[in-house]
Image: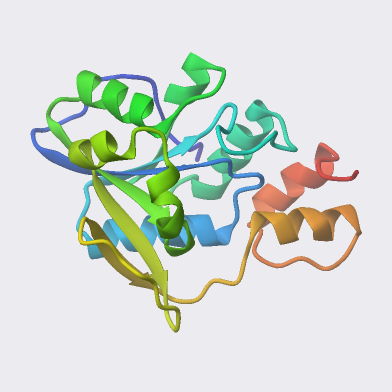
Amino acid sequence: MKAQLIFYVGVKGDFMKVGLFGGTFDPPHLGHYEIGKAVREKLELDEVWFIPTYEPPHKDNATASPNDRLRMLERLIAGEEGLYISTIEFNREGRSYTIDTVKALQKRHPEVQFYFIIGGDQIAYLPNWYKIEELKRLVQFVGVRRKGYSYDIPEQIQMVEIPDLPYSSTSIREGLKNNEPIEGLDEKVERYIRENHLYER
């Protein structure tokens, strides 16, 4: 089953609770999938929307094309109830900042309460985000905390604890580049990577 994409259509029902999970997803791995599932279940959200960046604002470049990253993400969450993909930043192209994305989604979906999901390691960098004070007034931040890790948590951030998932896109890319054993890839995603010769150099 193909992952459902959200193209600015109306959301069914009133006062839905939706988690927004943005990222480069280069490549998307099982840790991303488990975070989406865990946050949805523990906060009793109606849905979680994965939002792949078109051009990351805080990185020089992604190593797979935007369309390849989207295709991989579709494969990762295909068939999982409550997990969807929003292509809002693809339709805008260029660099997108979180505040622009949140404002656009709130305008199109005024009946939805949004929660923005970040990893625990990102909390320390929040003060450096573009227009962060305004953004904190617009959306509830949800921090994902791994068991055994401690963070200095601002009051405005709601924390969700998940099992330790030792996967990272960086280590997966390096493993693929060096033809080493890798962990954390869904088999459909890995097949796509190898068929399209991604991350080989």
Pinpoint residue 59: horizontal percent, then vertical percent. 63, 38
Q: Nearer the viewer, residue 95 or 33?
A: 95
Q: Is residue 87 above or below residue 147?
A: above
Left or right side of 144 for 114: left
Left or right side of 168 for 160: left
Left or right side of 129 for 19: left
Asked which quadrant contains residue 150, the reply is: bottom left
Quarter occupied by the C terminus: top right
Q: Residue at x 44, y 84 (%)?
A: 148
Asked which quadrant contains residue 64, the reply is: top right
Pinpoint residue 107: horizontal percent, then vertical percent. 21, 19
Q: Residue at x 42, y 40 (%)?
A: 129
Pinpoint residue 34: horizontal percent, then vertical percent. 45, 62
Q: Residue at x 66, y 54 (%)?
A: 169
Q: Nearer the viewer, residue 98 or 196?
A: 98
Residue that protrudes farthest toward the bottom in the picture = 148
